[in-house]
Image (tube, rainbow, N blue to C red):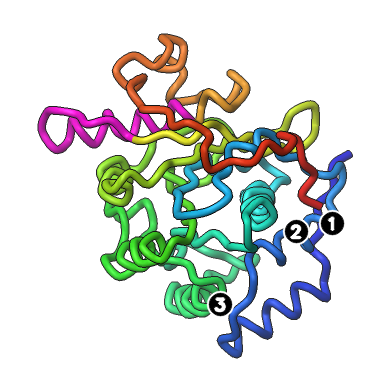
Amino acid sequence: MSQYRFPKGLLLRIALAVLLGRKRSLGDDSAAGLRGAWPPPVALGTEHIPRRGPFVVVGNHYERPGLWVGWGVMVVNAMVRATGERPRDLHWLMVAELLDFRLGRFVVPRAWVRAVFVRFARSYEFGLVTPRETGAVGSPAGLRAIARWLAAGEPVGVLPEGTASEALREARPGSGAFLAWLTRDGIPLVPVGIAERNGVLTATFGPPFCLPRVDGDKTTRDRILRDTVMVAIGRLLPPALWGYYRPLLERGGADADSAVSLPPAEADARPGNSNPA
């Protein structure tokens, strides 16, 4: 039976750092948090993670009843930290608030949630974006922060769906155009599919790729770009989790099958199987 429990001592240290505005390593805290997980999570295809320079990790928002979305993301965090020429942390886009957060019957005011999230983002250097339900991709400040980290040679992470789910759901409108803008100078996208395989939480990394140039109006271009990204992620998942993108994946990608794969020049010849704990 799977069991995931975050160490209480580590949780208290993180809470104190967030309260005091102190910086912490996302990758180190993720690896430490996973050490008590059973069965131990696995990372596959880690040879595809660039060892240096900026890149954008794009993944699915995998969550099921009894398994919080953060556990799979923590596997990704730990592996990005461990596979570089130097220790480096992912800078994620993170929602700035939850539209309906409850503790039992008590509805936590959105302003309280926002205040905690702002402090959390400062400690781990995240970019804050608006919730999916607002219909916007994100705040200008959060998007600019992500762009600055890439310009500084740091990796960033984006979950295009914007909402946790077990099977793939449609990527957030505007996310395709945003990712194209973010990677316009040839910065690679690194797809990762998060799923449970034979009862083991697994993050599978795929080959880096660049988005294609596409024609059409703004809405059409964004859809094709979103489809391209989500197909790359879906190919790393069991078919049972293809969800919204099943028809496109069953057709082999169709018009989304135009991403340009990059040679593994930035990757080690290290094993593609790792245990982040």
SS type, badge 1: loop
Q: Position of residue 75 (x, y in %)?
A: 69, 49
- The residue that disc 2 covers is 31
Disc on the earlier residue, 3 or 1: 1
Q: Is residue 28 left or right of residue 241?
A: right
Please give the name of the residue rendered at 58% of the width and 62% of the height, measured from the top-left corner. 89
Task: Look at the image and say whether residue 206 sits in the magenta stretch.
Answer: no
Mark 2: give few (<14), some (14-19) or many (20+) Cα within 10 Å: many
Amino acid type of the residue that numbered disc 2 sits on in the rendered structure: Ala
Residue 215's image quarter? top left
> Is residue 68 shown to the viewer in this render?
no
- The residue that disc 3 covers is 123
Dots 1, 2 in contact, CB < 8 A: yes
Position above or below: 71 against 147: above
Task: Look at the image and say whether residue 223 sits in the magenta stretch.
Answer: yes
Disc on the earlier residue, 2 or 3: 2
Amino acid type of the residue that numbered disc 3 sits on in the rendered structure: Ser
SS type, badge 3: helix
| CA–CA distance in space, label 2 to label 3 | 17 Å
- The residue that disc 1 covers is 35
Q: Is residue 202 left or right of residue 145?
A: right
Q: Position of residue 161 (x, y in %)?
A: 43, 42
Q: Position of residue 143 (x, y in %)?
A: 32, 62
The residue stretch that appears in magenta: 211-232
Q: Position of residue 190 (x, y in %)?
A: 49, 40
